[in-house]
Image (tube, rainbow, N blue to C red):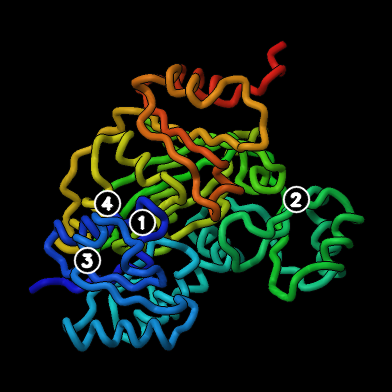
Amino acid sequence: MLMNIIHFSPHFPDNYYQFTVGLKQAGATALGIGDAHYDSLCPELKAALTEYYRVDSMEDYVQVLRAVGYFTHRYGKIDRLDSFNEYWLDLEARLRTDFNIFGLKTDGIDRVKRKSRMKEVFQQAKIAVARGVVAPDLTAARAFVRDTGFPLVAKPDRGVGALNTYKIANDAELAAFYAAKPEIDYILEEFIDGDIMSFDGLTDHDGRIVFCTGHVYMGGIMETVNEDEHIWYCSYRTLPEDLEAAGRRVVDAFAIRERFFHIEFFRTRKHGKIVALEINMRPPGGYTTDMFNYANDIDIYQQWANVVVHNEFRAVYERKYHCCYIGRKSNKAYEHSHEQVLEQLGSRLAFHTPVSGVFRSALGDYGYLVRSGSMAEIKEAIAFVHAIRGEGA
């Protein structure tokens, strides 16, 4: 029997249409719901979709509910639905609950959306976490600071990415933050001086990890957004043993079934200790799914579809290359032009593209994907792309 699978907002981001293509190739009935006009969809997406239902707004639950109801009436029970975007996790969970669809439902959404709840699960998995508290007012915040000291980080307890996240260095900044704090829960965390790493992958229907990799980041996304820095992050060829061990414990603790995961950790600079930051029940953002492919010579979009439709990951991978994302921002005076970058990177350049608006604050205005078996070559590429005019003089 054909599986009926809905891809929410299948046109966004630009590279995610390939999940729908994978579904068709795996033998599923691929259905789409989105707010984009059908004529704006790329030809490959149109060819893969059995049917597309346009809504005026994905924020309007009644419209989306009606769309799922229509597909149910026309094709039978919906077996899966996903957007691969954190923003729509609540919407998806509510629909899975209302239509009794396999996957993350409303009763499990808080533990993967609220950072305070994530900490509880990390601790159950015996993973170190930054001390943190949901502090509703300045009095509670100051009580927390008496234990941790400054600096600290303030972030929405239920938020997406690094938006509205701040580093607070002293009491005056803390008071200013609370004077202007939005009417939502914020969690305060001790600042961890460390390098950010991630454990990323995909589980099958039974919760087995069928694909995993890891990445190291030049700095935090918070700093990239707030300080307008450019960014690079790169995949490992060999995963650090403690990172993989911690990541696997977290996957088990959250009982992740038939989903991508993106788990962020710090490695403290002082002691080299692994500290859990947060978990995301989605693929890592930007072009990281393409980095999976270039680093391993696989098609992760197709393999996800194979897992969902057949519960089989059919590719063999061995992390043949490092793959690195290098972003540039248009307001920086780079030493080398785009044309010079293309010439210098040569065969190491796997892909390059302008970055769409919503991702620019984190990824920059233009991105290059570079792959090599040698980390030394990757570092040379980063230095060349990010060289600022006059800094080497």
Camera-nearest label, 3 or 4: 3
Q: How far from the left and from the top, in percent, is residue 48?
A: 20, 61
Camera-nearest label, 2 or 4: 4
Q: Which residue in the protein does label 1 denote? A: 260
Q: How far from the left and from the top, in percent, is residue 146?
A: 85, 57
Q: Residues within 10 Å of mark 1 (few under 14, many from 20)?
A: many
Question: In this rendering, would 61 be left or right of 138?
Answer: left
The reply to whether dot 2 and dot 4 touch (C-beta < 8 Å) is no
CA separation in Å, label 2 and label 4: 36 Å
Residue 293 falls in image quadrant: top left
Residue 274 seen anywhere in this rendered image of the structure: no
Residue 363 falls in image quadrant: top right
CA separation in Å, label 2 and label 3: 44 Å
Q: Earlier in the sequence, mark 4 or mark 1?
A: 1
Q: Residues within 10 Å of mark 2 (few under 14, many from 20)?
A: many
Q: Earlier in the sequence, mark 3 or mark 4?
A: 3
Q: Residues within 10 Å of mark 4 (few under 14, many from 20)?
A: many
Q: Which residue in the protein does label 4 denote? A: 301
Residue 177 falls in image quadrant: bottom right
Camera-nearest label, 2 or 3: 3
Q: Amino acid at mark 2?
A: Lys
The reply to whether dot 3 and dot 4 touch (C-beta < 8 Å) is no
SS label for mark 3: loop
Q: Which residue in the protein does label 3 denote? A: 49
Q: Which residue in the protein does label 2 denote? A: 167
Q: Quadrant of the C terminus?
A: top right
Q: Residues within 10 Å of mark 3 (few under 14, many from 20)?
A: many
Q: How far from the left and from the top, in percent, is residue 199?
A: 43, 46
